[in-house]
Amino acid sequence: MLRLFRIRRDMLGSAVSRRLSTTRSPLPPTPLPHRREVHLWYIKPEEINDSSSQLKHYMDLLSPSEKRDVSSLSGERLQKNAILARTLTRTTLSRYCDGRVDPGSIKFRKGLYGKPEIMWQDGDNIIKPPLQFNLSHTSSLIACAVALETPIGIDVEEKKRQTVKSVLAVARRYFTVSEVEYLAAIPYPDIQRKEFIQLWTLKEAYVKAIGRGFSGAPFKNFTIVMGSDKRAPKMHIEADSDCEGLADNCQFALMELNSSHVVAVCMERDQEISDDEKNSLRLKVWRTIPLIEDELVSGTETVNYICGLS
């Protein structure tokens, strides 16, 4: 049975527009994730009208620098997705602040390698949860993952993603020798492409989890070993690589979303938990139209878990 949990601010489009344009109240609070649990919220841009007052309201939530960044982009589609990405981040984080933080008031700073972090303001009369978050997007889906304390990385890729060159040509340029050999041994092109996209997604999630990004942690410096029978993928650092800042104690989870996207999540293992089962990742997934509707889709056909989740 499909489990739907929805919050609808209003059923009439005109009423929604009026309310969105005049209201800046925080979102209803969401319980914080448990230890080793990840919450994932995603938007489908196609569900939001390009010319609706929603986008104007979302734009109002952004900081002056974010607005400048959006305005500098060429093309309405890029601008729309940039607005939605920043809105999703702000509204998602606001949910975990006990309903006392307006999404537009949240401030950010960049870490050592440019990964965004929350910058709590001195004097904020709120409990400041140790939230970790990460964002990923394609043109058709934008996702924000949240966890407590442990840094997290997420990557989203379209299952039908095309490459200019062959899959193996791209793999030879970016992947390690053992990963290329793994892909080359697959005789069926469709399966080979599927495995390539999953590998790429896992590697992106890893470099984002450690806060280094693609340039700070080249893909050739570490190998992802795909699991089997629902086992989580594993990784090891190449012996001849510059391994400074790389960690080999990470855990991965892999899934399909909406039968159209591959999603990978990466977190460091909790060294205080020796039991592998208790150390496994747990995941809750919501589809959202910020400030209008939320739908819990975990346990439905929308989410297809591939491996790495308890």
Image: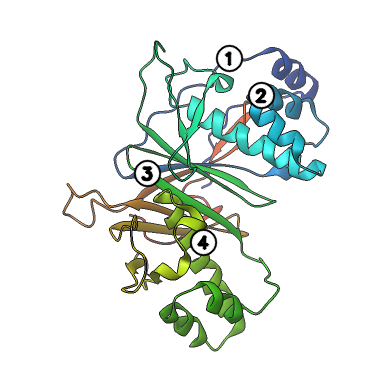
Rendered image coloring scheme: rainbow
Q: According to the image, label 3 marks what residue?
A: 151
**Tag 3: residue type?**
Pro
User: Image height check: is 82 above or below 165?
Assistant: above
**Tag 4: residue type?**
Thr
Q: Nearer the viewer, mark 4 or mark 1?
A: 4
Q: Residues within 10 Å of mark 3 (few under 14, many from 20)?
A: some
Q: Which of the 4 image quarters holds residue 182? A: bottom left
Q: Which of the 4 image quarters holds residue 243? A: bottom left
Foreground pick, 153 / 241: 241
Which quadrant of the rendered structure holds the C terminus? bottom left
Q: Residues within 10 Å of mark 2 (few under 14, many from 20)?
A: few
Q: Can you give x and y, in whole percent of width and height, for residue 296 in the image?
A: 51, 39
Using the numbered discs, state the Cα–Cα distance from disc 2 to disc 4 in whole angstroms.
32 Å
Q: According to the image, label 1 marks what residue?
A: 25
Q: Nearer the viewer, mark 1 or mark 2?
A: 2
Q: According to the image, label 4 marks what residue?
A: 201
Q: Residue at x 39, y 10 (%)?
A: 123
Using the numbered discs, state the Cα–Cα distance from disc 1 to disc 2 in whole angstroms.
20 Å
Q: Residue at x 49, y 73 (%)?
A: 175
Residue 89 visible: yes
Which mark is on residue 64?
2
Q: Nearer the viewer, mark 3 or mark 2?
A: 2
Element marked by disc 1: loop
Element marked by disc 4: helix
Q: Can you give x and y, in whole percent of width and height, for residue 46 in the image?
A: 74, 44
